[in-house]
Structure formats: structure tokens, C-alpha cells
Image (cartoon, rainbow, N blue to C red):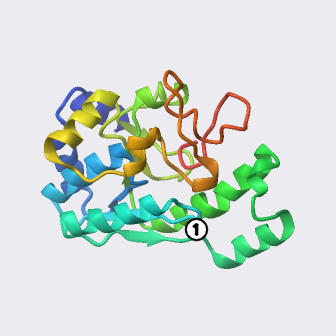
Amino acid sequence: MIKELNNRFRNKPVNEVLSFFLKEYKGKIAFASSLGAEDQVLTHLIAAIDPEIRIFTLDTGRLFQETYDLIERTNSRYKIRMEIYFPEAHRVEKMVHEKGINLFYESVENRKLCCHIRKVEPLRRALNGMDIWITGLRREQSFNRNNMELVEADESHKGLLKLNPLIDWTHEMVWDFIKERNIPYNTLHDKGFPSIGCLPCTRAVEPGEDIRAGRWWWEMEGKKECGLHE
């Protein structure tokens, strides 16, 4: 089925892809937005097709104020109410008590633990009962994402499909779309933040650096993912 879907929708317009999946999986599909530029494009498109589709985001408790502001601006612009999922309080309290508030700087193991508790576990709750989830992943974003397809089996969430409508889009395509339609976006993008996650784990990047160089910058180069797309 996955191969057939990829063949059917290869090089098709994003609107056509979304329209099919939003109708075909209605009630069993959700969009997980990180409030990044790509996700704002998808929110714009999804709201125009079916504003009742579930759109949710994960609040780790360590986000930038600019990200919270964007949630409000997005809800207002598209007349939606984005669902917000938080980590389990007792899990965060136990982790911080045992390893410290900024444990992620101490080791990759600690950082992945923090990501797991603050992101991965809430995502699993958010996707409970769904058959497919939409993401804003693009191949161009990082080396780790080069081999991703439009439709994939989600190995992290057995039984679910993952839909990546913007998989073939370039950085320029994303920003041209945003500017042409005056889509709300995170103002940190104007300050050198191409990829925005938690405040203590994200910095601006220098000209010429990889777009994800500002994520967990203290770690050695390699596979830098939070666990949501592994």
C-alpha cells in the first residue's frame, strides 16, 4: 500500500495530496506541528481544506516565548484551537530531581532522556487512536532525512503511517509560500534561527552553517534527532 501511495502521489501538488489523505483518513489523521516554517505552511493548507482536522503541538515546558506567541497568532489567523500536549509532571519532576534541571548538557544519554520524556511520550499520547500523522519533514533539512518518502511506515509507532507532504520542497519554496500569503511564522527565524526547538537547546546559526547546526550544538556532529522521527 505504501509503495502504491508514493507512486500515485509522486510529484503531485501538496493540495491534492492533503485533500486525499484528509478525506480518506478523516477522524484518524492528525497533524503534529512544531510551529516551524514548514508546519505553518501545512497549517495554512490544512485549515483551508478542513479546519476541523486535529492539529496539535508539544509543549515541553522549555519553549521560547516567541513560540508561545506564534500559537496564539496561528489560532487567531485560522480560527482554530491547536491542541497542546504536555509531558507527565511526575516524570519531569523525577528526572530533574535525579539529574538536574539542565541535564541535557551533561551527556547525549541525558539529552535523549529529556527529549523522550518531554516530547516522545506526549507524542504517543497525542497519536493514540490515529492511523496516520502529518509532519513538516523535508529531505533537504538534514542528511538523516535524505531517504524519507512522502508516505512511510512509522517504525516508532507501529501500525501508523507518516505523511510528509513537503518532503520535496526546498527552503526557498517554503519561504516564498509564507511571504506570498503573509502566513504567521516564528519571529526567531528573522534572528538566525532556521530550526527552533527548546530554548536551552537551540541557538542561532552562522552564515554557511547547516540549518540544524543550532540544535544541540554542544554535541559531536552526527545524527541529531530528538526521537520523534527515528
Q: Nearer the viewer, residue 37 or 138?
A: 37
Q: Give the total number of marks visible in the rendering.
A: 1
What amino acid is labelled 1 in the image?
A: Gly
Above or below residue 191? Residue 145 is above
Residue 45 in the image: state x and y as whole percent.
Answer: 19, 50
Q: Is residue 28 left or right of residue 194?
A: left
Residue at the farthest front position: 191
Residue 127 shows in this picture? no
Between 112 and 121, the one lying in front of the other is 112
The residue depicted at 71 percent of the width and 50 percent of the height is 112
Q: Vertical placement of 18 versus 220: above or below? A: below
Mark 1 secondary-structure assignment: loop
Number of residues whose C-alpha sits closer than 10 Å to that of mark 1, classed few (under 14), some (14–19) or many (20 or more) = few
Is residue 175 positioned above or below 103 on the image? above
Residue sticking out furthest to the right: 98
Q: Which residue sits at x=50%, y=21%?
A: 208
Q: Who is closer to the viewer here, 32 or 217?
A: 217
In the rendered structure, the answer to whether residue 3 lies left or right of residue 197 reads left
Residue beneath the point at 22% across and 31% down: 8
Quadrant containing the N terminus is top left
Give residue 32's quadrant in the image: bottom left
Q: Quadrant of residue 216?
A: top right
Q: Is residue 5 above or below residue 39?
A: above
Residue 35 in picture, x, y percent from top left:
39, 54
Residue identifier under label 1:
61
Instruction: State the image coordinates of residue 4 (x, y, percent, origin top left).
Output: 29, 32
Residue 126 visible, this orientation: yes
Name the residue at 15% across, 45% down: 181
Residue 50 percent across, percent down from the top left? 17, 61
The quadrant in which the C terminus is found is: top right
